[in-house]
Image (cartoon, rainbow, N blue to C red):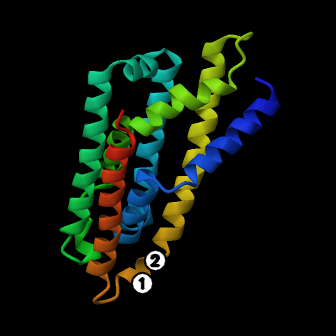
Amino acid sequence: MEAGPLLSFALASLLIELTPGPNMTWLALVAAGEGRRRGYAAVAGVALGLAVLGLAAAFGVAELLQRSMIAYEILRWAGGLFLLYLAWDGWRGNGDVAQTGNGSNSIYFLRGLVTNMLNPKAALFYVAVLPTFLDPARPLLGQTLALSVVYVSVATVVHAGIVTAAGALTAFTQKPGREIATRRVLSSLLALVAVWLIWSTAR
């Protein structure tokens, strides 16, 4: 692909990723409560989930999913309910940040992966937004894969930045009396995002 369309798509991807959503809220919750290491593990899981959806879009699976009402509804509700579960898991943390992160980094990686595999917004992006940057005169598969790489790269940079910034707050959140309050505020925001996701993706 030419540099012009790639740069335009990268800018569009950046603006979309800077818009508050499920990934941003959840990654901030993980990094502020569990530390940057687990936040970066979650970022890796999110990146893999977005990459898998990009491959699915390249081979037409995402479009097929978009056309199937039953499959779309299952994905929409599964994604929203999983986010609600993550919010509840964060809410019921015992307040000791050093002890609430009993899970290994792989758990946060898998949660990031599942969250994005069940994210209808991401699937819709590949179906509705990405195709507008394709040149029909050229092979579509290669273009779709190239744009998917760009999108995943941009998203990963943004997500890593969120984790880095939120991770800087751990010194503040670990002070007595602040752990539970911080965790529950972020968990409440994540629950609101989950409800918004279910509502906004309804057909």
**Residue 121 percent location from the top left of the image:** 44, 39
Residue 112's x, y, as percent? 37, 47
Q: Amino acid at mark 2?
A: Leu
Residue 98 picture location, percent across and down: 28, 75
Amino acid type, callout 1: Phe
Q: Is residue 34 left or right of residue 6?
A: left
Residue at the image point whose x is 40% and y is 70% from the top:
32
Image point (46%, 77%), residue name: 169
**Residue 126 drawn at (x, y percent):** 52, 29
Dot 1: element:
helix
Does residue 70 appear to the left or right of 154 in the view shown? left
Q: Residue at x 55, y 48 (%)?
A: 156
Identify the mark at residue 15; answer none if there is no mark.
none
**Relative to 8, is 193 above or below?**
below
Residue at mark 1: 172
State if disc 1 and disc 2 touch (CB < 8 Å).
Answer: yes
Q: On the image, numbered disc 2 is attached to which residue?
A: 169
